[in-house]
Image: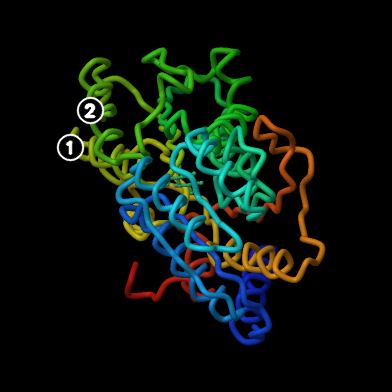
């Protein structure tokens, strides 16, 4: 029932944007995205462009190669020089834009931080994202529930894969998951055999699938994880790219759908959803990029009109220069049981894409 309501609310929100957009706005908006190599950022970029144009704005959409920081800096520099009125930026390295954004501040160009918080810059006016702590909570809670950590008598074994240390979201995903799992790790009920538990030790450069696969292969050979060998009950992976890398390594070691450890993810990328259907990955976190784009377009519209910008969090996200007023969208856990309603019935994917 709750899921139905959420899905209908999603559809209604998306419809409202698609059907009722006016052409009353006329800002030139620079949209800087980190990469096209991950499905979600392509969707984010396309959604933003389409919705902003529908609102009457003109859009300069740029992808920074494959997570190339100097390219992103150059592209933002050009957006500022070419007369963009508002910038929307999903940063690669949250701390690498301090210098270039001084130019935006000098020209009074408002900057909206998209999905990831831009750190150490007082040019950032607003932040729109998903509730990143909640994303981690959902992943941690899923593992706790599936392993029945509350009641289990025997020890359970887990490994942890996080995103890169330069993505501020990682801290929140990690914090959220650890709110749930750390008590069990501290009590010895949940054991990380590799001993790799810090964000640095668990980090994956650029959220790269192959990097995650390599690290999982290394853990398999150093610890002898295997269906007939050393027990591995769960892998906390922070997004779907990492989950796919981990699944590849585990499949190659002889695991299959019947004995795969519990594996989490995030984004509901198509390959991951296929893996969920096949029983290789257990859950992902659905972050409806249409909702985020809708929220950012509303922010841009309000900024353009000089109206009050809608935010729902004014305490959580401090970027080193102060708390950035934020709008947090709600993430939803996606599993084999609800993906049909969440992803297909809501129109996010066509059935034949999965
Ligand atoms: C985003 C995730 C995404 C990851 C890799 C994070 O900052 O919040 O949705 O999976 O970056 O691109």
User: Residue at position x 28%, y 27% from top?
Assistant: 215
Residue at image mark 2: 217
Q: Quadrant of the C terminus?
A: bottom left
- Which structural element holds mark 1? helix
Q: Looking at the picture, tell me which residue is in the foreground, 105 or 201.
A: 105
Q: Is residue 340 above or below residue 330?
A: below
Task: Locate the N terminus and report the quarter of the image it occupies.
Answer: bottom right
283 above or below 163? below
| Spot occupied by residue 325 in the image (x, y as percentages of width and height) | 74, 47
Quadrant position of residue 86: bottom right
95 in relation to 271, above or below: above
Residue drawn at the location 39% of the way across and 76% of the way down: 350
Front in this rendered view, residue 313 or 284: 313
Q: Secondary structure at mark 2?
A: helix
The reply to whether callout 2 and callout 1 are in contact (CB within 8 Å) is yes
In x, y percent, where is residue 122? 67, 39
Kindly indicate the quadrant of the structure image that contains residue 84. Answer: bottom right
Can you identify the residue that label 1 sits on?
252
Residue in view at x 56 percent, y 69 percent: 28
Whether residue 1 is visible, yes or no, is: no
Percent across and percent down for residue 111 are: 62, 52
Within-10-Å neighbours for mark 2: few <14, some 14–19, many 20+: many
Classed neighbour count for the residue bearing mark 1: other residues with Cα under 10 Å, few (<14), some (14–19), many (≥20): few
Q: Quadrant of residue 40?
A: bottom left
């Amino acid at each position: 029932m709750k899921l139905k309501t959420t899905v209908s609310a999603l559809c209604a929100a998306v419809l409202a944007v698609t059907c009722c957009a006016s052409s009353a706005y006329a800002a030139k908006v620079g949209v800087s995205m980190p990469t096209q190599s991950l499905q979600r950022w392509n969707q984010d970029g396309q959604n933003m462009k389409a919705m902003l144009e529908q609102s009457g704005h003109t859009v300069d959409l740029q992808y920074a190669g494959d997570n190339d920081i100097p390219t992103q800096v150059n592209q933002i520099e050009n957006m500022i020089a070419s007369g963009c009125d508002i910038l929307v930026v999903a940063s690669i390295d949250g701390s690498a834009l301090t210098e270039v954004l001084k130019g935006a501040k000098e020209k009074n160009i408002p900057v909206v931080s998209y999905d990831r918080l831009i750190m150490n810059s007082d040019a950032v006016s607003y932040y729109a994202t998903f509730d990143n702590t909640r994303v981690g909570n959902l992943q941690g809670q899923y593992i706790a529930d599936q392993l029945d950590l509350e009641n289990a008598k025997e020890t359970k074994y887990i490994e942890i894969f996080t995103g890169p240390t330069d993505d501020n979201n990682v801290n929140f995903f990690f914090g959220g998951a650890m709110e749930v799992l750390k008590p069990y790790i501290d009590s010895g009920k949940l054991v990380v055999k590799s001993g790799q538990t810090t964000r640095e030790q668990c980090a994956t450069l650029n959220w790269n699938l192959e990097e995650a696969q390599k690290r999982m292969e290394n853990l398999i050979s150093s610890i002898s994880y295997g269906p007939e060998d050393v027990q591995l009950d769960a892998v906390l992976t922070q997004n779907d790219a990492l989950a796919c890398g981990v699944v590849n390594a585990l499949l190659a070691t002889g695991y299959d759908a019947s004995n795969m450890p519990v594996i989490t993810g995030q984004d509901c990328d198509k390959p991951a959803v296929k893996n969920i259907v096949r029983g290789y990955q257990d859950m992902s976190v659905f972050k409806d990029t249409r909702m985020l784009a809708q929220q950012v377009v509303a922010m841009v519209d309000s900024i353009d009109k000089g109206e009050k910008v809608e935010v729902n969090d004014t305490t959580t996200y401090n970027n080193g220069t102060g708390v950035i007023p934020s709008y947090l969208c709600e993430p939803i856990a996606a599993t084999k049981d609800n993906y049909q309603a969440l992803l297909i019935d809501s129109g996010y994917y066509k059935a034949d894409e999965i």
